[in-house]
Image: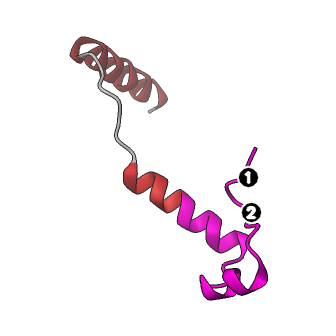
Amino acid sequence: YRPFLTNSDNFERWTRLGAKDTKMRAAEIYKKKLEDYVAPEMDPRMRQELDEFVAMRKSQLD
């Protein structure tokens, strides 16, 4: 198991690569994941039913 958020580089390498703390690394990772995200394909009929359901529930909240 290799943690994806922590950095196990030695101090010199960590400094050379920007000395990023955990907060900075987490921000980079989540931004990259959002940028690379591709929504899975959905059956058009299922999408329509879902949209209708959401519209119905929204109308009930008004």
Foreground of the two, 62 or 44: 44
Tell me the residue at 46%/59% (across/down): 32
Amino acid type at image mark 2:
Thr
Q: Position of residue 24 (x, y in %)?
A: 63, 74
Q: Which mark is residue 6?
A: 2
Residue 49, picture quadrant: top left
Q: Which mark is residue 28?
A: none
- Look at the numbered disc 2 and give the secondary structure of its residue: loop
Extent of the magenta region: 1-29
For the rendered model, the colour scheme is secondary structure
Residue ID for mark 1: 3
The 10 Å Cα crowd at callout 2, few under 14, some 14 to 19, many 20 or more, is few
Figure check: 8 above or below 44: below
Q: Position of residue 60 (x, y in %)?
A: 45, 24
Tell me the residue at 58%/67% (across/down): 27
Left or right: 45 with respect to 12? left
Amino acid type at image mark 1:
Pro
Q: How many dots with numbers? A: 2
Q: Position of residue 36 (x, y in %)?
A: 38, 51
